[in-house]
Amino acid sequence: MGERDGVSDDAVLDLSGESVGEEHDSSSPFFVSKKAAAILKHEILKQYVVPFASKVGRYAPDGRVVYLDSYAGPGRYEDGTPGSPALILESAARVAAFRQLDCYFVERGRKNFRALSQLVAEAQNHGLAAHALQGRAEKHLDSVLDRAQGAPFFAFLDPFGLGLSFEALTRQIFGTRTQRGASGRPVTEVLLNFNANAVRRIGGLLTSKKDVANKPATLSAMDTACGGPWWRDVYLESQDNPEAVARITHGFVERVRRAVGSGAAAIQVRNRAHHQVAYHLVLFSRHRDGLWLFGEAASLSQVEWRRAQLPPPNDEMLWSPVDTFEDEEAQRARKWVRTIRGNIEKLLRERGTFTVDDHQSEIMQGVLGEAREMHIRAALKELYREGKTTCNGVGAVRKLQITPVSSRQSG
């Protein structure tokens, strides 16, 4: 393989996703202020959870939807910025008039748990259904799933390193669910952080000549998280770290998807545009509505992620980056529309008439998580003006039927 990151003792992780012997508490630099990568995942939660609860809770008893955050942290950053628990409780308050978002937050660290408990107590005082649970994620999983019987269920799994075991994800979360939607399948969705840094660091143990403590146990923990040792050969066969991360992530997602019979969508998350991937956010959903909603949420969230990276105004600057931000976004949109146009034209050649809703992955290939439905509409309107389809792009995008213009029609 090519050059790799060095492996240090702090790379040794247990299955809970935390460094062995270390308590991730509110004194950790991670919780001092929100990094750009956290902005992206938190925006996705804000964009996704309310529509999810609104839709799937429509036919649930008492409108109850269960939410689980298995690696919650303190709930807020030291500077007061909301973390994922605070953001979700804000969402619960927004839908309280017509849905009950029953929230379970699990945190292992003692200091984090004290802060989290205070946040949850405040929410309870405002009439929200919220629960703080201390300990490892897997310790509480069966109990939370028992309480979720009969209700739609959404799990946010955001560990520092490795997360739940493959078995816990595929058999406990997806395999024991009985609440079913109109499709007859359980209404269960998982948004998961598959940590690229953990892949790089633990994978580095395979080639490291250092005498690293607990090396066999750490590699075994990675096997357990990935559903077997298959990832080891993938890592060793890859040319460099980016290739290893991409291939192992893809392999993991495909194995989960096949095991639970779901669709999946993944986006890369970085702290800065020029940084290496920190993790992939992956949604596992058994309904195409979830995948479309995730695509919209990811696209809107990435706008805010890019905005957060703008440097603060400086009197010495000839112009402010804020002034050019919208122009740069418009340039990106034009590129996305060109890509989508090409994808649609390919589908027209290969399939003839088709419906947008049936071909999300093909239409959005190369721009999934960046572009959204408005860009599909723009591409269709361009193709209609050029006489390449009879679809004019008017109406609900997902329901649009795209038909090629025959040579007789075009003549």
Image (tube, rainbow, N blue to C red):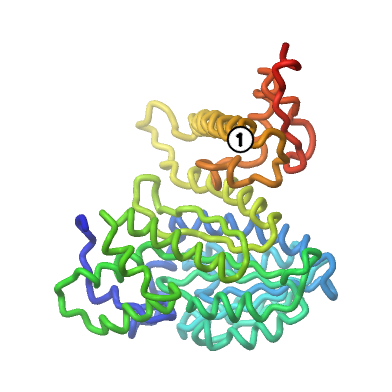
The quadrant of the image that shows the N terminus is: bottom left
Q: Relative to 236, is 278 on the left or the right?
A: right
Q: Depth check: give the residue in front, 189 or 230.
A: 230
Picture residue at 59% right of the left edge, 56% below the top: 44
Across and down, in percent, residue 323 comes to: 50, 30
Q: Is residue 195 left or right of residue 240?
A: right
The picture places residue 93, in percent across and down from the top left corner, at 73, 66
Residue extending farthest top: 411
User: Could one spot residue 96 in this view of the protein?
Assistant: no
Give left or right: position of 72 versus 216: right
**Residue 222 location (% of width, % of height):** 37, 75
- Helix, strand or loop at label 1? It is helix
Residue identified by numbered label 1 = 350
Task: List x then y, in percent, for residue 186.
Answer: 72, 71
Q: Nearer the viewer, residue 31 or 66?
A: 66
Residue count near mark 1 (Cα–Cα under 10 Å), binned few <14, some 14–19, many ≥20: few
Write the residue at 63% across / 46% down: 360
